[in-house]
Image (cartoon, grey):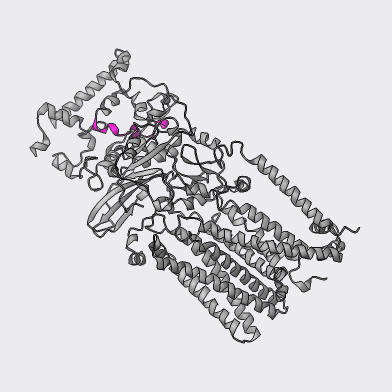
């Protein structure tokens, strides 16, 4: 309170509207854009290879797709846990309101799921056909389904597949961008909340999505390859890190631009935003999101991108940086979503948020929701081998 | 004092004998003639005189009806009757408010101190003790749904579970609401909350069920000073029509939000948000 | 068995079409009947809301039975006060013309709290032209009664000035003038 009083004389009574005491969108709504962000970023990595022909990314291209699918499968989970009446979720598909930013989610999600599944099935088709011919019983039925009961891997057929893959990934890029830019717009479209209602919101969400997805791919790539004692493709890693650096610089610039323009314009509810960032969010925003998880990785990225350093150091720094950036995006989601709701619409005070442990949207639920994609990833890995050279072709 | 006591006795004597007479049936038949206010013994509550006279004995035309709600801040005494009535009318769960009353205090440096303990449900029994300033101005502000003409809550609802009726009310379809909470985020006035029992969005409805039966909203009906006014705009003789036609300064809350509220305020100081 | 070069493609496209058709039919079937009559919502929800149980009625409803109180209440300064605010909602008392429960009458300290919700002068935001306020316990001492006195010992709760005015008439003595 002292800090707030010092900053803004308008807030002295710290009055919160009686209905604003509850934070209605809590940790599950933090996870939802985080998970869709990971999907998006991973998909962009795959798209760089399959559409833009960045050949050096070949080692991680397949893994990125499977990774994206594993997380996309769970993207609706936090939403269902959050809904007051989850059993009515189909209403979103039955009567989507044309004037609501949220209504499109069901359809956009459905389409991106369909496109992603098709891309994966087409890419793995030769491998799946081979497996089908080898396997018996239940597995045979599974492979039969996954290959659409076709065993044709003739050159003509595969050439057609290649064209389709390129087409699907190409339409996948705008869909992925819409999926996540649109998540940003869900927040950006709320005029009642001064920290959310900025046209920059979709852009910020999109770039931070790319950052989180690429970081996740780098992180997972280094960790799995190290643990399975396989060789890390340095060319691939360097491309990934460079791209990540580019996206992160953009994301960070836009995040800071938003704060800067609020601070400079000093319009309307500016005192509320300023008080929020310097009051309840002082640690989670300035200390963690900006200093530890943005400025530090920025220097680390500069260090490994610009200086000729030894391979082990490069790998190690890339690993640390990707981890820090994963946290950066998580903190950014938290600060936007939970932080934004800490401001009462009375423009006179801030409420508090204390996460519960065993609530439907509590910490345990968060851990479970974040663990499920990895289980799915593990299962998918049994059917679709992640790494290019593993697949016998 | 003696006088008072004797009078007390006199009245209770009166009352006793009166009741006796009634019980004996001596004046039972004439009861109807005695009290003009209770001239009819109503068989059902529906028989009572309508509080919105223009709606009485008429087919309700949903596409033509037009109402207004006016809050006169200069008359509010912060008794909290409205909050109590609202809570009882809807059995609102503790800690959630369809309507509430705020207390504003302003000092000589233009600092504003606002509070609303329990939404004013228990009234304001004591002055604020946590601040030590010379008070320049102090007043109460009742809050409720603004019934925006362009409601952000309706705009954002993904499934059309909150909607604007042809007669201008913003209501919630409790059978379809999924409880996503987007409308709660979108409402600039924070009048919405998630009902902890039904897990669906809830808000003030200006007592739509009462209005349709010709009754005032519960909070208006119990307001002792007439600080809350509700009426039919199609009726030129209604109090709200006259107020809105007159020269008085009428404001709305958060005009810059572009929601065009249907809830008007009389005497709202600039500090009111 | 060798499949055709594009047989998997044809199956996928057919699958998508079947899925879309089923989705479309499902959407049509599951959309509520009255949806879209007035706009993008279920029109029946309006009537459902209109049919909600009314719990507060009016003073007229209460006073139609409580004739004795009616006589006093309607003449007194408290005539604008809702019966149901102090006593509780009508619906907890009467249902279909029959008494179903007893509503409380506030007594002692509870009553004082109830009175002071409106009449406490210490809450400055109460304009004199709207309501008469007093400071407690100054009011009791200035009226020369014991500090333990309850409001209802001098003021009839339904018509607060009834006793005062009657006393004035009988005695010709005005406490205010005497002060």
Residue A356 percent location from the top left of the image: 51, 58
Q: Residue A216 falls in which quadrant of the image?
A: bottom right
Query: In this image, C52 relative to C173: left or right?
Result: right
Residue placed at 27% from the left, 29% from the top?
A: C73
- Residue nearest the viewer, comparing C163 with A202: A202
Determine whether B246 is above or below B255 in the image: above
The quarter of the image holding the C terminus of chain A is bottom right
Left or right: C168 as drawn, with respect to A316: left
Q: Is residue A385 above or below residue C75?
A: below
Q: How many marks?
A: 0
Residue A296 sits above or below residue B99 on the image: below
Q: Nearer the viewer, residue A249 or A130?
A: A249
**Quadrant into which the N terminus of chain A falls:** bottom left
Residue A89, can we see it? yes
| Residue A316 pos. (x, y %) | 62, 80
Is residue B227 left or right of A164 when viewed as pictured? left
In terms of image quadrants, where is residue B110?
bottom left
The residue drawn where x is 40% and y is 68% is: A264
Quadrant housing residue C110:
top left
Which residue reaches farthest left?
C178
Magenta part of the chain: C76-92
Residue that protrudes farthest toward the right in the picture: C1
Going 27% across and 39% down the picture, which residue do you hit? C115
Give above or below for C40 relative to C15: above
Percent of width and height locating residue A334: 51, 63
Indicate yes or no whether the magenta region holds residue B210. Answer: no
Determine whether, in the image, residue C137 is placed left or right of residue C94: left
Main secondary structure type of the part rendered in magenta: helix
Residue A278 in sight here: no
Q: Residue C39, percent across and down?
A: 55, 40
């Amino acid at each position: 309170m002292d800090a707030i009083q010092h900053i803004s004389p308008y807030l002295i009574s710290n009055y919160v509207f009686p209905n604003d005491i509850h934070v209605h969108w809590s940790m599950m709504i933090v996870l939802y854009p985080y998970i869709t962000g990971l999907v998006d970023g991973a998909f962009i990595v795959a798209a760089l290879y399959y559409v833009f022909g960045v050949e050096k990314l070949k080692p991680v291209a397949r893994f990125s797709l499977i990774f994206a699918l594993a997380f996309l499968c769970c993207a609706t989970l936090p939403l269902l846990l959050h809904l007051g009446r989850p059993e009515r979720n189909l209403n979103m598909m039955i009567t989507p309101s044309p004037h609501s930013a949220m209504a499109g989610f069901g359809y956009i999600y459905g389409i991106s799921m369909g496109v992603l599944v098709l891309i994966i099935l087409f890419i793995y088709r030769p491998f799946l056909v081979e497996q089908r011919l080898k396997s018996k019983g239940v597995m045979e039925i599974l492979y039969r389904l996954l290959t659409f009961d076709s065993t044709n891997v003739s050159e003509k057929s595969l050439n057609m597949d290649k064209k389709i893959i390129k087409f699907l990934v190409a339409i996948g890029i705008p869909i992925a961008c819409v999926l996540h830019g649109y998540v940003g717009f869900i927040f950006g479209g709320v005029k009642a909340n001064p920290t959310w209602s900025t046209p920059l919101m979709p852009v910020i969400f999109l770039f931070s999505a790319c950052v989180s997805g690429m970081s996740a791919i780098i992180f997972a790539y280094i960790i799995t390859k190290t643990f399975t004692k396989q060789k890390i493709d340095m060319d691939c890693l360097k491309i990934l890190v460079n791209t990540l650096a580019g996206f992160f610089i953009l994301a960070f610039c836009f995040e800071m631009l938003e704060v800067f323009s609020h601070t400079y314009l000093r319009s309307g509810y500016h005192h509320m935003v300023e008080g929020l960032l310097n009051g309840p969010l002082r640690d989670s925003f300035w200390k963690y999101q900006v200093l530890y998880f943005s400025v530090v990785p920025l220097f680390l990225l500069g260090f490994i991108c610009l200086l000729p350093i030894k391979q082990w150091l490069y790998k190690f720094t890339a690993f640390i940086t990707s981890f820090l950036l994963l946290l950066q995006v998580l903190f950014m989601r938290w600060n936007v979503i939970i932080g934004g709701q800490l401001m009462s619409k009375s423009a006179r005070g801030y409420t508090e948020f204390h996460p519960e442990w065993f609530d439907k949207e509590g910490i345990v639920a968060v851990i479970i929701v974040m663990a499920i994609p990895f289980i799915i990833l593990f299962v998918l890995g049994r059917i679709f081998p992640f790494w290019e050279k593993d697949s016998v072709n | 004092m003696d006088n008072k006591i004797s009078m007390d006795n006199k009245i209770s004597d009166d009352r006793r004998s009166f009741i006796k007479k009634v019980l004996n049936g001596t004046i039972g038949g004439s009861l109807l003639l005695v009290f003009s206010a209770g001239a009819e013994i109503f068989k059902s509550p529906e028989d009572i005189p309508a509080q919105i006279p223009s709606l009485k004995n008429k087919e309700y035309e949903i596409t033509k009806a037009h109402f207004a709600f006016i809050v006169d801040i200069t008359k509010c005494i912060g008794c909290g009757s409205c909050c109590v009535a609202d809570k009882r009318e809807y059995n609102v769960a503790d800690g959630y408010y369809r309507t509430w009353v705020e207390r504003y205090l302003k000092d000589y440096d233009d600092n504003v101190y606002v509070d609303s303990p329990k939404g004013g449900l228990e009234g304001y029994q004591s002055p604020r003790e946590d601040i030590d300033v010379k008070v320049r101005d102090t007043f109460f502000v009742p809050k409720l749904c603004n019934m925006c003409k362009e409601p952000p809550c309706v705009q954002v609802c993904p499934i059309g579970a909150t909607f604007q009726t042809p007669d201008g009310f913003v209501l919630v379809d409790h059978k379809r609401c999924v409880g996503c909470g987007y409308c709660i985020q979108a409402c600039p006035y924070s009048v919405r909350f998630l009902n902890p029992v039904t897990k669906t969005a809830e808000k003030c409805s200006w007592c739509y069920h009462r209005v349709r039966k010709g009754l005032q909203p519960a909070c208006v009906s119990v307001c002792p000073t007439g600080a809350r006014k509700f009426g039919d705009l199609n009726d030129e003789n209604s109090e709200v029509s006259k107020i809105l036609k007159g020269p008085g300064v009428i404001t709305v809350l958060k005009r810059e939000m572009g929601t065009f509220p249907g809830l008007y305020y009389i005497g709202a100081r600039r500090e009111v948000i | 068995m060798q499949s055709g070069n594009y047989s998997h493609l044809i199956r996928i496209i057919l699958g998508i079409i079947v899925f879309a058709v089923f989705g479309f039919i499902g959407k049509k079937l599951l959309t509520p009947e009255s949806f879209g009559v007035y706009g993008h919502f279920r029109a029946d929800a309006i009537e459902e809301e209109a049919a909600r149980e009314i719990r507060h009625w009016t003073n007229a409803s209460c006073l139609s039975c409580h004739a004795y109180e009616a006589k006093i209440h309607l003449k007194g300064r408290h005539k604008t006060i809702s019966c149901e605010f102090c006593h509780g909602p009508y619906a907890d008392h009467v249902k279909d013309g029959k008494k179903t429960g007893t509503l409380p009458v506030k007594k002692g300290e509870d009553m004082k709290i109830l009175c002071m919700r409106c009449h406490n002068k210490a809450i400055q935001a109460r304009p004199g032209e709207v309501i008469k306020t007093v400071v407690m316990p100054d009011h009791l001492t200035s009226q020369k009664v014991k500090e333990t006195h309850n409001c209802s010992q001098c003021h009839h709760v339904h018509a607060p000035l009834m006793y005062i005015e009657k006393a004035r008439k009988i005695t010709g003595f005005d406490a205010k003038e005497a002060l």
